[in-house]
Structure formats: C-alpha cells, structure tokens
Image (spheres, rainbow, N blue to C red):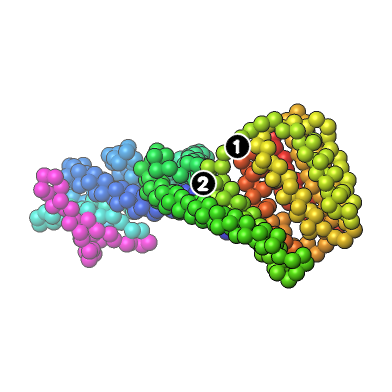
Amino acid sequence: MIKSFKLHIILQLIVLLCIYIYINRVFSQYLAFEFIQDKVNAELVQLIEDERIFTADNVESKTSFFSNTKFNSLVKCSATHESKNELCGRFEQSLIDWSVIKTQDSKTFEFGKLSLSGVVWHVIRKKNTPRDDYLAIDESEINFVLSSTWEIRDYVQSRVLPLMAFLLILVSYYLSTHIVNIINKIKTIISNTDIKNLNIENQSVSVHYEFQPFIDVFNDLRIRLKASFDQASRFSAEASHELRTPLTILRGYSERGIKNSDENSNEQIQFILMAEEIDRLINITDKLLILARSDAGHLELSPSLVNLTDIFEQLALDAEIINPDLRISTNIQKKVLWECDHQLIHQLIYNLYSNASKYNTKNGWIHFALSQSSNLLTFEILNSSDNVSVDLPKKAFDRFYRGEESHTRKIEGTGLGLSLCKEIAKIHGGDLTLSVNAHQHVSAKFSVNF
C-alpha cells in the first residue's frame, strides 16, 4: 500500500501515460493505415486516367507518387490499349469484391483486392465500355510505406519518451506538492484554532473555491465548538460560584457545632468529619472555577517578580516538619527570580509537593530541584513510590483521574490538582510533564523558555 501522496500521484500519471501511449499506437496504426490506403486510392484514381501504360517490365516510365515514392509493382491495364500483361486478363476474369470510390468531381471508381501466387494486389477499376480500365499495385509496397512510417514514429517516440517521462514526473511532483501545500494550509488553520480564536468574525476563507466547502464545514464546526465551550465554561463558573456560598455557610455551621460540642464526643467527631468534607467540596469548586476560566480563555495573570528560591526552600523546611518519616533533599539554585503570577505558581508547586507526599512510600523520600540559565527555567519534584499505575504518565493530567490506590479513599484528593497545574503551566508559556522510571520514582518537571 502506497502511503506517500506524491508518489501515488506520480505513479497514477505514469500509468495514464502508458495507457495513452498504448491507445495512441493502436489508433495511430489504424488511422495511418486508413489514411495511406485512402491516399493510395486517390492517387491511383488520378493515374488510371493517365494515357501512359504501366507494366511490370516498364518501371522507368512509371510516375512517382505518394510523397515521391516510386512503386515498382505498378501495373495499368487500359481498355484503349492492348496489353500483353497476363495480370490484366486475371483482373478481368477474377471475382473481386469491389468497393465504390467517389471523387470530388463525382466520378465513380471501384477498388478491391486480389491474391495471385502469394501476392496480394490492390486493384482500382474504372468502368468503361466494352472493357474496364485497371490499375493495380502490390500491397506489400503499401505496407512497406506503412512500416517505414512506423519506424519513423518509433524512432521519434524512443527519443521523446524519456523527456516526456521526466516532464511527467516533474509536473506530477509540482502538482502533488501544490495540492499538499493547500492541504497543509488548511491543516495549519485547523491546528492553530483554539478557544481564543473561535469567534465568528475570524472565519477562514480558502484561496481556491473548490476547497471552500471544507472551510465552510470547519467554520460551522468552530461556531458550534465556541457555543459548546461558552456553555460549558459558563455552567462550570456559575455552578462553582453558586456552590461556594452555601458551602461556606455550611462550613461556618460545622465550626460552630465543633465549638459547642463536648470535647471528643461523637457529635464533635461528626462535625469535624462534616467540616473536612465541606472543605474538600470548597477546594473542588475553587479548582473548577479556575479551570472554567482557563477553558474560556479568561484566566488572567497578575505578574510580579517572584523569588522561587525562597518558595522552594520554605517548602523543603515545611516538608521536614510535616512529613518527619520522609527524607527531604534539595538542589536549589540561589536567587532564582521569575516574573509570574505568584498565587498560581505557588499553587502549582504546592500541588506537586502534595502529590509527592501523598503518593509516597513508607520511609520514602522527596527531592526538590530548581535551576535557571540564561534562557531556561526548570524546577522538579521527585519522590519514591510503588505500585504506580502504568497509564499514570498519560492520564495524570486528565480531570478527575486518580491512581488505583486513591480509589480506596485512603488518599485524599479530587483528581483536579494535576490538570489545574497543567493549565497554570500552559498559561505561563511553560510545559509540565510527569514521568516514572524503572525504580518507580515519579518525577513532576516544569520548564519554561524565556
């Protein structure tokens, strides 16, 4: 199966060229034979009315005709002259299937073929009284002229065919390249389409009207995508906003219940569990609101110069206190400053650290790395782990995706943290990746070019 479109076009055109050459040879032979036969008949008609007599022994007196070709077998039998040529008698005695020829001056002649002693004679007859006039020529000489024509044709084709093949490949390559370029332009338009340029006023137009129907379908799809994005983003934003108020009120009631309950009583424990679940719902709504703004292209940055070194060093100190069972190591470059949204980047870093601590092993470790060069900033949080899901690197950034262990509800989380981190990295022009090596060490790495 041919996968290259250009090669497919070239082979298609080469096949068409071969078919054309074959048809041309077949039809040209047929048409050339008809043409030569008609030409011979027309000139034989002129000679049959000539007063001269042509015999097989009288070659010198024969008139050259048909492109100055002299036919040595030309024989004329005239009713006004007695001929000793025995062929004349055979012409009169033989039963020939005659066909009618009409000249431009409305004269009627007949022609036919007669085979004598292995020789096929092409005979012209002029009706006369009391005897007819005949003019005959050996058909092998006509075929000789025809074969000479084929030789000229084959010689010319053998010289022209390589050039034709080269030009065909050149033209087919140009045409296929031109078509591919048009398709690539359409692909570029489609690949560059995102939530920011789905507006109706930015509709695309094709240079070639044959491709406009495809562009129209794409424009219609973009309008429907815009409406779907707006509807989904509006729903997420409004739902998150509307949920946050009653959840905050419920959080207040649960805190009041905790204070008014007896210490370590069942009621206080239930209020504490209720407060934790409410905090979890508030966390989900906050993240959904940020994701909804990001999807709609409304997530705005408040850039400021942020000291990332201080953030990572403080996070490493906190990690040693909060997770005393984990070994904390660092490789943090000093005085790393970056102009970014402090709140969003802090949330990104904290979410990565939170995952590294929650999905760690007993007596495991966490490593913080931060470096900056002239045009690249990277930070990475690595942690030990076990039983990591095979599809984790591919699905980690999917919303509401959580590892297999998390489904036991022993590990808290919403499945929105990493997807939120991905959006924060994207809006800052960076890239966030998650990888797992053969030793079940998980690496979350952020990088951005200046």
Instruction: Give the numbered dot on residue 363.
Output: none
The location of residue 185, given as percent across then percent down, is 49, 41
In the image: residue 409, left or right of residue 234: right
Q: Magenta region: which residues? A: 90-118
How busy is the neighbourhood of tag 2: few (under 14 within 10 Å), some, or many (20 plus)?
A: some
Residue appearing at x 28%, y 59% in the figure: 113
Could you tell me how far apart the alpha carbons at marks 1 and 2 are, in whole angstroms?
A: 14 Å
Label 2 sits on a secondary structure element that is: loop
Q: Where residue 333 sits: x, y (%)?
A: 83, 34
Residue 153 magenta-highlighted: no
Q: Measuring 80% from the left and 44% from the top, which residue is drawn there?
A: 315
Residue 90 location, x and y as percent? Answer: 25, 61
Residue type at tag 1: Leu
Q: Is residue 332 left or right of residue 272?
A: right
Q: Which residue matches tag 1?
A: 301
292 or 440: nearer the viewer: 292
Q: Residue furthest top?
A: 374
Q: Quadrant of the C terminus?
A: top right
Q: Quadrant of the N terminus?
A: bottom right
Q: Residue at x 84, y 38 (%)?
A: 332
Question: Which amino acid, by three-letter code, is at mark 2?
Answer: Ala
- Mark nearer the viewer, 1 or 2: 1
Foreground of the two, 167 or 212: 212
Q: Is residue 107 highlighted in magenta?
A: yes
Residue that carries the numbered disc 2 in the rendered image: 296
Q: Furthest residue to the bottom?
A: 266
Height in image: 206 above or below 401? above
Dot placed on the residue nearer the N-terminal end, 1 or 2: 2
Q: Is residue 210 above or below residue 403?
A: above
